[in-house]
Image (spheres, helix red, strand yellow):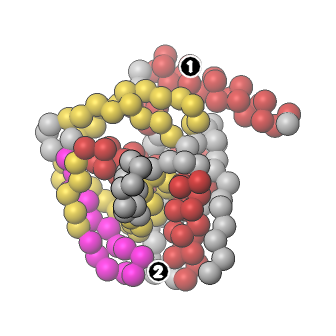
Amino acid sequence: MIRMKRNILLHPDPRLKKAAKPVSDLSDELRQLADDMLETMYDAPGIGLAAPQVGLSDRLIVLDCRKEEGETPRPLVMFNPRVLSSSDETNVYEEGCLSIPDQFADVTRPAEVDVEWIDRDGTLRRETFDKLWATCVQHEIDHLDGRLFIDHLKPLRRQMITRKMVKLKRELARE
């Protein structure tokens, strides 16, 4: 199987603000895309990646929050993921994003979420996530709805990060 790293879109990009379309049928191409996305995510390195971040409008996310040395990886591929329920209790994590490199901010989200999705074999799965896993899966599902973690911030902070990203994209274009 040929694996390929994908290019990650950088904010601001209108494709990051569009809601992704549900996946109606799992094809070999979509499974390959999931594999490519996992390789891209690990290579970046990151703990989650959504299809819109690689320029595709499919409801597909990949994640693996096991990042400690010696920990066995737990790559998850989720087609059409959705949060079924979330806790009233919240957690605050410093979030970052592969589409907004080197920018981090505290984001408050539900501490626990119950998520349903279709795995790469076409099986309907359901699991309750907490801690970093809960934050990550919510962050990636946000991408599928055209939301970025900075959309959870106050306008001034969001604008400051966006200005830094515009400057970074300008510098990269010159290289």
Q: Secondary structure at mark 2?
A: loop
Q: Is residue 57 visible?
A: no
Q: Is residue 159 magenta?
A: no
Q: Quadrant of residue 123?
A: bottom left
Residue sitting at x 26%, y 72%: 125
Relative to 97, residue 113 above or below: below
Q: Secondary structure at mark 1?
A: helix
The quarter in which the C terminus is drawn is top right
Q: x and y percent of residue 23 in the render?
A: 45, 72
Q: Label 1 belongs to which residue?
A: 160
- Left or right? Give the position of 151 relative to 168: left
- Left or right? Give the position of 174 relative to 82: right
| Magenta part of the chain | 112-125
Q: Residues within 10 Å of mark 1 (few under 14, many from 20)?
A: few
Between 156 and 137, the one lying in front of the other is: 137
Q: Label 2 is placed on what type of residue? A: Leu
Q: CA distance from mark 2 to mark 1?
A: 40 Å
Relative to 150, residue 128 above or below: below
Relative to 124, residue 161 above or below: above
Our reading of the magenta stretch's main secondary structure is: strand
Residue sitting at x 31%, y 59%: 82
Between 144 and 34, the one lying in front of the other is: 34
| N-terminal label among 2 and 1 | 2
Q: x and y percent of residue 83 in the render?
A: 27, 55
The quarter in which the N terminus is drawn is bottom right
Residue 26, labelled with which disc? Answer: 2
Q: Is residue 133 visible?
A: yes
Q: x and y percent of residue 161 in the render?
A: 56, 24
Residue sitting at x 45%, y 60%: 62
Q: Residue furthest left?
A: 88
